[in-house]
Image (cartoon, helix red, strand yellow):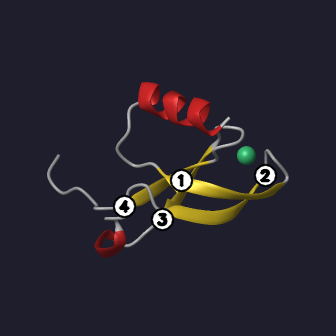
C-alpha cells in the first residue's frame, strides 16, 4: 500500500539488565545515538542510565551490555 506513517521511536537500553524501552520521539530529535537518558527501569526497579540504541544490531547490543558489567 502507499502511505507510511512516519512514527519515530527511540530504543533505550538498560545497561544493567539489558531491557530495551521503546519511547516515541519526534523525528527532529533522533540524532542522539549513544545518548544517556536516566529513566526508571521496571526490571531493575531502579533508575538506570539508559543508552540510546536505535541502530545497533543485537550482537552489538549484547557487546554493549557485556562492557557495562
Ligand atoms: Zn534494568
> Decide: marks 3, 4 in contact (CB < 8 A)?
yes
What is the CA distance from the residue labelled 3 to the residue labelled 2?
A: 18 Å
What is the CA distance from the residue labelled 1 to the residue labelled 4?
A: 17 Å
Which residue is drawn at the image coordinates 45% and 48% (left, top)? 53
Front label number (1 vs 4): 1
State yes or no: Cβ of the residue under disc 2 lies below 8 Å from any atom of ligand 1: yes
Front label number (2 vs 1): 1
Q: Is residue 58 above or below residue 14?
A: above
Picture coordinates of residue 64, whole percent (x, y)? 52, 36
- Compare marks 2 and 4 and give the one earlier in the sequence: 4
What is the CA distance from the residue labelled 2 to the residue labelled 4?
A: 23 Å
Picture coordinates of residue 54, whole percent (x, y)? 39, 49
Q: Is residue 57 above or below residue 46?
A: above
Residue at the disc numbered 2 = 42
**Would you call the spot at circle 4 few (<14 residues within 10 Å), some (14-19), or many (20 or more)?**
some
**Would you call the spot at circle 2 few (<14 residues within 10 Å), some (14-19), or many (20 or more)?**
few
State yes or no: Cβ of the residue under disc 1 lies below 8 Å from any atom of ligand 1: no
Tag 1, which secondary structure?
A: strand
Residue 14 relative to residue 52: left or right = right
> Decide: marks 1, 4 in contact (CB < 8 A)?
no
Q: Which mark is residue 51?
A: 1
Residue at the disc numbered 3 = 24
Report the residue that reaches farthest toward the right: 45
Amino acid at each position: 500500500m502507499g502511505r507510511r506513517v512516519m512514527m519515530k521511536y527511540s530504543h533505550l537500553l538498560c545497561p544493567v539488565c539489558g531491557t530495551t524501552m521503546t519511547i516515541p520521539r519526534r523525528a527532529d530529535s533522533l540524532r542522539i545515538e549513544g545518548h544517556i537518558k536516566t529513566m526508571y527501569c521496571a526490571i531493575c526497579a531502579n533508575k538506570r542510565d539508559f543508552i540510546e540504541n536505535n541502530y545497533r544490531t543485537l550482537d552489538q547490543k549484547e557487546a554493549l551490555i557485556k562492557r557495562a558489567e
